[in-house]
Image (tube, coloured by chain):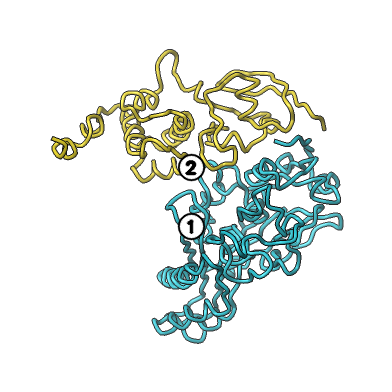
Amino acid sequence: MRRFQVAMPKSVPGAVAASGDDFDETKFLAGGTDLLAEIKDHTQFPDVLVNLKSIPGLKEIKVSDSGVEIGALVTLSELASHKEIKRSWPALVEAIGHAASPQIRNVGTVGGNLCQRVRCWYYRHDEYPCLKKGGQICYAQQGENEYHSVFGNRICAAPHPSSTAPVLIAYGAQVEIHGPEGARTIDLEDFFHSPEDDVTQENILTSKEVVTKITLDRANTSKHSAYCEARERDAFDWSLCGATVNLQMDGDSVKRARVVLSAIAPTPVRRKDLEKVLVESGVGSGALEKIAKLSIRGARPLEQNEYKLTLVKAMLKRAILKAVKG
Amino acid sequence: MSNTTTLTLRINDEDVTVAFPTHHTLLEVLREECRLTGTKHGCELGECGTCTVLVDGKPMLSCLVLAAEMDGHEIRTVEGMMIGNTLHPLQQAFADLGAAQCGYCTPGILMAAEALLEANPDPTREQIQEALAGNLCRCTGYIKILEAVEWAAATQRGEDTPPAKESIYGSPHAATKGE
């Protein structure tokens, strides 16, 4: 692996102070399951890793009457085995259960899961200088694109790989970000940005900004929430398509809905159009067919991934039915 | 910050003071500085599980953690599995059942299985599959591995339930067919 040094700051402001002006200078190190693999794959070249694990307080899960605050360095296994998360945010536990392997979930953090880079094999291969790496071309457009995006893929076709992000968005999560100007909190929905905004990054963070906390509000959760995904292998595989549905129900009618699709576009995609149909038409079989049909409108499948449209419809219907059941 | 780190690592209940390049992974330091070569280099990218060790009792991939971060943590490798001169029940079961062919994935699988049995002495087949989901084996087809873990778990519980004869001698159905 390429040589780097490791900074061990003792506080979040210390970590920000240790960070450099671009990503080739410094990268923040959380679990490292993605970052170290990227350095080995020659897609990242930081001179210094700013280790967040040396900062106390970023590994806590704080439960209160209003919700829960999750430190960015809480590991995926710690989160999925937390009693209150299991009780009140079940779709999150479901999504984590499908992510990677037990070994990786024991190290990978929730903050890192949101900030991980795409899995596109052209991006991960050092011989392909793709758009994400400052090159001129997205090789997936005309190349091997079986696993790529079917929505929003005109510039870069790499889908966002996080399986916690869509669920957290469906639960209305907020993220706390620390930078040189101090801390700010934004909706996780606004954290990711599309290739049109900046193809070289999947989120709004600069090299001097770091995610420190994820907040979930009890008012936005429901027992009628579910996550469904399709994979090629039953275990230890990336999602081909994920659907998260979070419904506030009153009898058979839907008072409020959140629908987020994942692994089919460069960002997790909140579908307000589908949410509207759920609230207006409910969850009967007619409404489900209408939603399924609407869900793939505007899709642009590439040569090898038209099958993902079938998966979008199926995962969506499955997630709705599972959410209704509660 | 420096290019070299010196740390006292706690490995298999022994303190080992080592100096190593700061950017080296735990896997590299275990094998190169500590000469504990039971832990294997596999994909190096978190995809195969053969470098699995236990850190504070939890299975982790030693290829994806930095040795520089291991201050104050308890590391266990396959070399620490034997109890005195006796093989760990998992090692014994894997050997007796032939739950290995080339053997390259075995140390990682043993570590993941040890962590499972520590937390759950009576796991179901499905729980074993989940615990070993991050460990690839390209030879065996996994059946004997799963049976060996079940057998070792039974042995640890003080039960004597050897696997079905078919696992040791092959399927009688297949044998009849071959005649």
- What's the residue at 69%, 55% (across, down)? A213
The residue labelled by disc 2 is B134
For label 2, the SS is loop
Colour of chain A in the image: cyan
Q: Looking at the picture, how far across and down is residue A241, in whole percent? A: 51, 64
Q: Which chain is yellow?
A: B
Question: Is residue A293 placed above or below A224 in the rendered structure?
Answer: below
Residue A99 visible in this rendered orientation of the protein:
yes
Q: Is A30 left, or right, of A79 in this rendering?
A: right
Where residue A186 sits, quadrant-wise, is: bottom right
Characterize the local packing of mark 1: few (<14), some (14-19) or many (20 or more) Cα atoms within 10 angstroms. some
Q: Is B173 left, or right, of B57 in this rendering?
A: left
The residue labelled by disc 1 is A94
Label 2, label 1: how far apart the Cα atoms are = 17 Å
Q: Amino acid at mark 1?
A: Glu
What residue occupies the far bottom of the structure in this picture?
Answer: A280
The tag on residue B129 is: none
Q: Looking at the picture, how far across and down is residue A232, in whole percent? A: 45, 56
Q: Is A298 left, or right, of B136 in this rendering?
A: right
Question: Is residue B18 placed above or below A294 in the rendered structure?
Answer: above
Q: Amino acid at mark 2?
A: Gly
- What's the residue at 50%, 43% (across, down)? A102
For label 1, the SS is helix
Q: Pinpoint the chain carrying mark 2.
A: B
Query: Which one is closest to the eye, mark 2 or mark 1?
Result: 2
Q: Looking at the picture, how far across and down is residue B145, in whole percent? A: 36, 35
Residue A71 visible in this rendered orientation of the protein:
no
In front of the other: A133 or B134: A133
